Amino acid sequence: MMVNYNHTVVVFLLLSLIFKLGSCTENQSQTNNVTVKCIQSEREALVRFKAGVIDFPGKLSSWFGEDCCQWKGVKCDNESGDVKASFSGDVNASLSGEISPYLGNLPSLTHLNLEGNYNLFTKNLDWVSSLSSLQKLYMGEVKINHTKADWLHAINMLPSLLELSLCSCQLEHLPSSLTFLNFTSLVVLDLSYNSFNTSIPQWLFNLTSLTKLDLTFTNQGGKILDSFGRLGRLGSLQYLYLAGNHFYGSIPASFGNLSSLNELDLSYNEMNGTIPESFGQLSTLVKLYLLENSWEGVITEAQLMNLINLEEFMLTTNKNQSLVFNVTHDGFPPSLKSLHLEGCRIGPKFPLWLKFQSEPTYVTLRNVGIEGTIPEEWFPMISAQLTILDLSNNQIKGNLPHQLVFPNVAKLFLQSNLFSGPIPSNISDLMPNLQYLDLSENQLSGTIPLSISKIKHLNILVLRRNNLSGKLPHNWNESQIGLRVVDISENNICGKIPSSMGFLGNLSILVLSNNNLSGEIPSSLQNCSIVSMDLGGNHLSGNLPSWIESNIFMLRLRSNLFNGTIPKKWCNLYKLCILDLAQNNLFGAIPNCFNNFTAMVDQNIFGYKPIENYTEKAYIVTKGREYEYDRTLQFVTCIDLSGNSLTGGIPIQITSLTRLGTLNLSMNHLIGSIPKNIGNMRWLETLDLSNNSLFGAIPGSMSSLTSLVHLNLSFNNLTGRIPSGNQLQTLIDATIYKGNPLLCGSPLLTKCLGDEASDGPTITGVDDKQGGDDYERIWFYASIGLGFVVGFWSVCGTLLLKKSWRHCYFRFYDDIKDRISLLIALKVVHLKMIFGLEKN
Ligand SMILES: *[C@@H]1O[C@H](CO)[C@@H](O)[C@H](O)[C@H]1NC(C)=O
Ligand SMILES: *[C@@H]1O[C@H](CO)[C@@H](O)[C@H](O)[C@H]1NC(C)=O
Ligand SMILES: *[C@@H]1O[C@H](CO)[C@@H](O)[C@H](O)[C@H]1NC(C)=O
Ligand SMILES: *[C@@H]1O[C@H](CO)[C@@H](O)[C@H](O)[C@H]1NC(C)=O
Ligand SMILES: *[C@@H]1O[C@H](CO)[C@@H](O)[C@H](O)[C@H]1NC(C)=O
Ligand SMILES: *[C@@H]1O[C@H](CO)[C@@H](O)[C@H](O)[C@H]1NC(C)=O
Ligand SMILES: *[C@@H]1O[C@H](CO)[C@@H](O)[C@H](O)[C@H]1NC(C)=O
Ligand SMILES: *[C@@H]1O[C@H](CO)[C@@H](O)[C@H](O)[C@H]1NC(C)=O
Ligand SMILES: *[C@@H]1O[C@H](CO)[C@@H](O)[C@H](O)[C@H]1NC(C)=O
Ligand SMILES: *[C@@H]1O[C@H](CO)[C@@H](O)[C@H](O)[C@H]1NC(C)=O
Ligand SMILES: *[C@@H]1O[C@H](CO)[C@@H](O)[C@H](O)[C@H]1NC(C)=O
Ligand SMILES: *[C@@H]1O[C@H](CO)[C@@H](O)[C@H](O)[C@H]1NC(C)=O
C-alpha cells in the first residue's frame, strides 16, 4: 500500500528525560561550558538504555562522553526539575527494541517521555516502580507486553505522579479495584486506545484532582448510569474524552456537576436518550462532541441556552430523525464557530437560530429534514464568514440564489437536495474562494456556466446526476491548475470533450459518464495526471487512448463507439485495477501482457491513490448485475471486455491475476480453450466467458475458485464433464452451461458416458486459502456493510496501516472535519479489533 505521510501534522516527542541531579552544581544557562558530571549510576542506566535499543535515525548520537547532562534529550536540573525538554523528529524516525530495565536506576528522574516510539517495547513496567520521583510519565505507543494487570501496581508506587499517558500501549487489563491509591495527585490520565474490555474502575473516582481524563477507544462497556454517574464527582475535570467505548444508556444528569468542563467527547458509543437539562449548567463548555450514538428525544433551549462559551458542537445520531431540535430563535449558543448536526430533525423550516450566530465559520446541517428554500432575507447575514457550508441530504427547493454571496466559502456541499434552475452564471463572483463544490443529485438544469472555469482555487467539482445540458465549458486554462476532480456524470451534456481540459495539469479524476458526449478523446488529456477516467455511456468514438499513463487506477470506457484494438502500450499500466471496455466495437486479440497489471496480482501495489475528501463513484458490472460502488471502489478489481468483436484465444497470462475479482470476456469471438490453470485466480468471484467460440474441456482447476459466485460459460462449444467440488457444487443453475451441446454431468441432465451408477467422480480442488487474502476479503465485505457518514480514505488508510499512528494523530490533528473522519476510521479499526482482524 502506498500512503502519503506528508500531510500529517503529527509531532512525536521521541525522547526526553528530566532529572534532578544533586551533582549539577552550576546554573548552566549562565556559563555554558561548565563541566558538570552526572552521577555515575545514572549515566550507567542511560548507557544501558541506549545499548538496548536500535537507534536507526541516530537520535541518541549525542549520547557519549562522561557528562550525561550534555546529552540531547536529557536535562539535568539541580532543584526546580521543571525544565521542559524534548526534541522532535520526523514521523518515521523512532527508537526500537526493548527498554532496558536499568532505566529504573534513575531515582531522581522527574519526567520520562518515550511517547511515539512505537517500535519500543518493554516486558513489564516493574522498572518504573523505582522511579520514585517521577511526576510525568509519557509512554504512548510503546508496547507493554503485559498479560496481567501488574502494570498498575508499578504505577501505584509513584506517589508524586501528576501526569500519566499510556495510550495505545496494547494494555489489556485494567484492575477494577486497588486497596490503596498512591497517585492521588494525578492531574492527567490518558489510557486511550487500549483494549480493556471492562468498565470504568472504582479507584478512578478517587482521583479528584483530575483535570483531564482520556479513555477514548478503551473498549469499556457497562451501563452508563452505574459508573458514569459517579464521574460527576470529578469536579475538576476540564477535558473528558470517552469516545469509542460501549457505554450505553443516556447521559446522566450528574454530568451537570462537572462545572469546569471545557471539552466533552462521548462520540461512538451506544448511548440513547437525549441531552439532560443539567447540561444547561456547563457554562464553561467550549467543545461538545456527541457523534454517532442513538440519540433521541427533544433538545430545547433548556439544554443549550446557557452554553454561552460553546464554540464547537457536533452531534450525529444513528436513529434517523429521532432526535428533534425544538429550540427558539435565541435559544442556541450564540458564538458557535463550528456546528455539525446530522441525522437529527431540525426542519422542516430553516432554523431561525442560525440567523443569530455571530461568527459561524463551519456549518453542517446534513440530513436534518430541512425543506423549503434558502431564506434570502437573512442568510446573507451569516454567509459572509462561512468557510464550509454543508446542507446536503435535505429537501431544499428553489433556485440557487444569484445574489447570495459567499466571499469566504471554500467548501460548499448542497448535494442531494431539490435545487432546480440553472447554476448562477456569475458563480465565480459569488464564491470566488471555492475549493470544493458539490451540487450533485439535484434537479439543476441549463448549461454549465463558463465562469466556473474562473474560480481560481477550485479543486473538486461535482455536478453528478442533474439535468444539465449543452456543452462542457471550453475555456479551461492553466490558472485552474489546482483542479483535481471533475465529475459531471449523469447529465445531458453533449458535444466533444474540450481539448482545453489538457491545461488542467493536475486533473486526476475525470468522470463524464452517462451523457451524450461524442467525438474522440482529445489527446491533450495526456497532459493531465489522470488516475481515474470514467467516460462510459456516451457516444465517444475513435481509437482507444494509447497515451494513458501508468498511474491510472480505473479506466472505464464501456458503452461507447470506440473501435480499433486494445493498445499494446497499456502493458505498462501496473496500477490498473478496473479496466472496463465493454460494449464497444473493439477487435483484434486481447494483448498477452495482462500479467503486467501488477495491482491485480500483488496486494502491496495499491493502485488507488485517493483524493482526500472526495469519494469517487462508479458503476461496475459484477455478479451479473450493475452495482454502484463508492468507498469500496478501491477494493474492486475487474476486467470487462464483453460485447466487442475480440478474436483469438484467452491469453494464459490473464490467469496470473490472482487478485482479479471480475473477468468478463463474454460476447466476443474468442476461440481456443479455457486456460488450464484458471484455478490460480483465487479472488475470482465473477467469470463470464459466455457467447464465444471456446472449445475443449472445462479445466478441473476451476473447482479451486473458492470465491466464485457467478459463472457463465453458456453458448460456447465446450466439451466433456463439468468439474465439480467446492464452490462449483453450489452453482447448480444449469443455464450457465447452456448452449454447449457436448458438455455432460451435473448440473446438466446429460449424463457422461459410464456414469450410469454414480454421480461421477468429484474433482476436489485444494482448499489452501491464504490467511492474508482472507483477511483482505473479509475486510472488504465488512467495509461494504458499514454505512460511513464521512470518510477520507487518506486518513483512514494511514490509520489502518499504522495502527500506532492513531492516537498521536488524534491528539494533534485539529481540523474538525477530519476529526469526524478520523473517528470513523477509528470505529473501523475498532470493528476490526472486535472481529479479530487487526493486523500488525
Ligand atoms: C540551583 O539552582 C538555583 C536556581 O534555581 C540556584 O540559585 C542555586 O544556586 C542552585 N543550587 C546549586 C546547589 O547549585
Ligand atoms: C540561570 O541564570 C539565569 C540568569 O542569571 C536565570 O535567569 C535563570 O533563572 C537561572 N536558571 C536556573 C535554572 O536557575
Ligand atoms: C568556554 O567557552 C568559551 C566560549 O564559549 C571558550 O572561549 C572557552 O575556551 C571555553 N572554556 C573551556 C574550558 O572549554
Ligand atoms: C513484546 O513485544 C515485542 C513487540 O511486539 C515483541 O517483539 C517481543 O517479542 C514481545 N516480547 C514478549 C516477551 O512477548
Ligand atoms: C505507595 O508508594 C510508596 C512509595 O513508592 C511505596 O513504598 C508503597 O508501597 C506504595 N503503596 C502501595 C500500596 O503500593
Ligand atoms: C476511595 O475513596 C473512598 C472514600 O471516598 C474510600 O473509602 C476508598 O477506600 C478510596 N479507595 C481507594 C482505592 O483509595
Ligand atoms: C435506551 O436503551 C435501553 C436498552 O439499551 C432501553 O432499555 C432504554 O429504554 C432506552 N432509552 C430510551 C430513552 O430509549
Ligand atoms: C416545540 O416547542 C413548542 C413550544 O415550546 C411546542 O408547542 C411544540 O409542541 C414543540 N414541538 C416538539 C416537536 O416538541
Ligand atoms: C482536502 O483535505 C485536505 C486535508 O485533508 C486539505 O488540505 C485540502 O484543502 C482539502 N481539499 C479540499 C478541496 O477540500
Ligand atoms: C472506426 O470508427 C471511425 C469513426 O467512428 C471510422 O471512421 C472508422 O472507419 C472505424 N474503423 C474501423 C476499422 O472500423
Ligand atoms: C511490463 O511492464 C514493464 C514495466 O512496468 C515494461 O517494462 C514491460 O515492457 C511490460 N511488458 C510488456 C509485455 O509490455
Ligand atoms: C464444435 O466442436 C465440434 C467438435 O470439436 C465441431 O465439429 C463443431 O463444428 C464445433 N461447432 C462450432 C459452432 O464451433
Image (spheres, grey):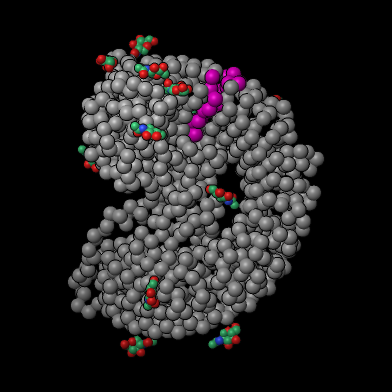
Residue 737 among magenta residues: no
For residue 611, above or below residue 809: below
Q: Quadrant of residue 302?
A: top right
Lateral position of residue 650 relative to residue 796, left or right: left
Range of magenta residues: 260-283
For residue 8, above or below residue 568: above
Identify the residue shown where x is 39% and y is 40%.
830
Identify the residue shown where x is 51% and y is 37%.
292
Q: Quadrant of residue 743?
A: bottom left
Q: Quadrant of ligand 3?
A: top left
Identify the residue shown where x is 48% and y is 66%.
552
Lateral position of residue 524 relative to residue 581, left or right: right
Q: Quadrant of the N terminus?
A: bottom left
Residue 319 visible here: no
Q: Say which of 205 and 747 sits in front.
A: 205
Q: Quadrant of residue 110?
A: top left
Q: Position of residue 500 (x, y in %)?
A: 65, 70
Lateral position of residue 329 relative to residue 124, left or right: right
Residue 238 visible here: yes
Residue 277 among magenta residues: yes
Q: Say which of 471 and 30 sits in front.
A: 30
Q: Position of residue 589 (x, y in %)?
A: 42, 83
